[in-house]
Amino acid sequence: MEIVSLNPEFEPVFWKHVNQDIPHYFFFGFDWRNNKDETDILLALAGRRIDGMMLVYKKRIVQFRGNREAARVLLEHLTLEKVELQAPKEHKQYILEKYEPTWSHELMLMVLHQGEETLHTSHPIVKLDASDAEQITAIMNKVDPEFWGEVTTKQITEGMSSTNWAGIKLNGELASVCRTRLTKQVGHIVTVATRETHRNKGYATSLVSHSVNSILNKTSTAIIYVLNDNQPAIRAYKKAGFKPYKTYYFIRGKRR
C-alpha cells in the first residue's frame, strides 16, 4: 500500500472516488475545493485504486475513510499531538491505541434525498445576520458547552459569508437557530440549537424543514450529523424525512 499526498496528478481518481458516495466523503470534497490552503489529504493507494484517505484541516481536525488496513497505515502518518477526529466506528481500536480521548461520542450521519422530505414549518422563520451573532453564540455555548463552548461571536460573524443562518424569534429574542451551507451536490445542515426554555415546541422541526426546503430548491440531497444519543434531535430530523446513513466514532483527544 502506497501513501501519497493529494496533488493534481491524483485529483481525477480522488474525485471519482468521492463522487461515488458524496455524503460519506462530504468534508473531503468540501475542504479540498473551498479550503485547500488549510487542508492536507493523504491517499492510501493499491495501484491506482484508493483504499482509504485521511483529511487534516487546520492541523487539528482529522477524518479517516477506507478499509481497516488503510486506516491503520494512515494513522501511522498522523503526527498531531491533539486532534478532533472522525472515522467509521470500526476504526475505533486503532484510534484509541494512539489517542487518549478527552471527549468521545458516536456520530450519526443522516441523509435526505429529494422526494423523501416531509416538511413541517409551523412557526415564522427569519433570516439572521451579523446583528444576531451574539445571541447565536450565547445559544450555542449554552446548549452544548462541551462541543460549542469555545465558539465566539467573531467566528459566527466571519462565517456568515459562507453559510446561511435562520432562526425563530420571540419578542426579539432568538429561541432557536439553524445554519446551512450549500454545495453543487449537497446541502449541509451544520447547526441546530434551541434554548432549553423553548424546547418541545416544534421550533427545531420548523427550522430543519425550512432549511431542507431551501436546500432542495437548489440541489437534490441534504445531510446532517447528530450525536447518536441525542434522541430528540434524531426524532426531529426523521420527522423532516432524514434517514440514518452511517455511524462514526468521534473524539477530541491527545497523543498517548
Image (cartoon, grey):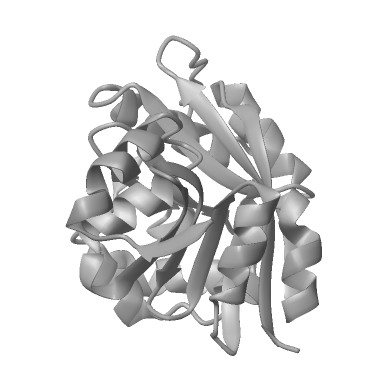
Q: Position of residue 223 (x, y in %)?
A: 47, 36
Q: Is residue 229 visible?
A: yes
- In the rendered image, the vertical position of residue 1 relative to residue 67, given as above or below: below
Q: Residue furthest top?
A: 115
> Who's the residue at 60% across and 33% down the image?
237
The N terminus lies in quadrant: bottom right
Q: Position of residue 81 (x, y in %)?
A: 59, 90
Which is nearer the eye, 154 or 134? Answer: 154
- In the rendered image, the vertical position of residue 206 relative to residue 240, given as above or below: below
Which is nearer the eye, 146 or 35? Answer: 35
Q: State the image quarter where residue 231 is shown.
A: top right
Q: Position of residue 242 (x, y in %)?
A: 57, 26
Q: State the image quarter where residue 13 is shown.
A: top left
- In the rendered image, the vertical position of residue 91 relative to residue 254, given as above or below: above
Q: Position of residue 155 (x, y in %)?
A: 33, 76
> Who's the residue at 64% across and 68% down the image?
144
Report how many numbered discs are placed on residues in the image.
0
The C terminus lies in quadrant: bottom right
> Who's the residue at 54% across and 85% down the image?
80
Q: Is residue 124 visible?
A: no
Which is nearer the eye, 208 or 109? Answer: 109
